[in-house]
Amino acid sequence: MEIVNMHKAKTNLSELVQKVLAGERVIISKNNVPVVELFIYKEPLFRREPGVLKGQIWSSEDCWEEDNDLNQSVENSEIFPE
């Protein structure tokens, strides 16, 4: 594993990419704090297509109606003080 600062990474980007392609781990730091890791790009395993689940998802007719018990619980909760 190699940790390089931002300036060195900008100066030696091609070299760092070659190291990643060879299987090494490269981390870029800023002010000695790791912020980014370089890794090999991989194509997604499958292509997403809109509408694949059309007709398979449903909601009940009352799904958007308020639940008074739930509202009371939230309003009286210590998590949401007035």
Image: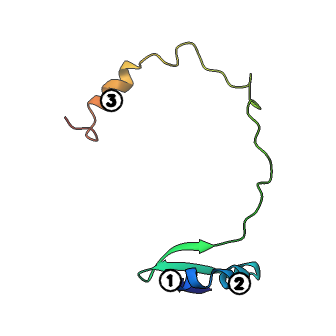
Question: Residue 50 at what x, y percent from top left?
Answer: 73, 33
Query: Disc 2 and disc 3: Cα gap in Å?
Result: 56 Å
Residue at left 54%, top 72%?
A: 36
* Colouring: rainbow
Foreground disc of the pair 2, 1? 1
Residue pushed farthest top? 61
Q: Secondary structure beneath disc 3?
A: helix
For the residue marked with disc 1, what is the amino acid? His
Image disc number at residue 19: 2
Question: Residue 16 at what x, y percent from top left?
Answer: 66, 82
Give the camera-side residue of 5 and 64: 5
Query: Disc 3 and disc 1: Cα gap in Å?
Result: 54 Å
For the residue marked with disc 3, what is the amino acid? Ser
Q: Secondary structure beneath disc 2?
A: helix
Residue at left 68%, top 85%?
A: 15
Q: Quick one: label 3, few (<14), some, or many (20+) residues within 10 Å?
A: few
Left or right placement of residue 60 versus residue 65 in this view: right
For the residue marked with disc 2, what is the amino acid? Lys
Foreground disc of the pair 2, 3? 2
Question: Residue 21 at what x, y percent from top left?
Answer: 75, 78
Left or right placement of residue 51 versus residue 74 in this view: right
Image disc number at residue 7: 1
Where does label 3 land, which residue? 73
Foreground disc of the pair 3, 1? 1
Residue at left 77%, top 32%?
A: 52
Residue pushed farthest right? 46
Q: Please tell me in which quadrant of the rendered image residue 41 appears.
A: bottom right
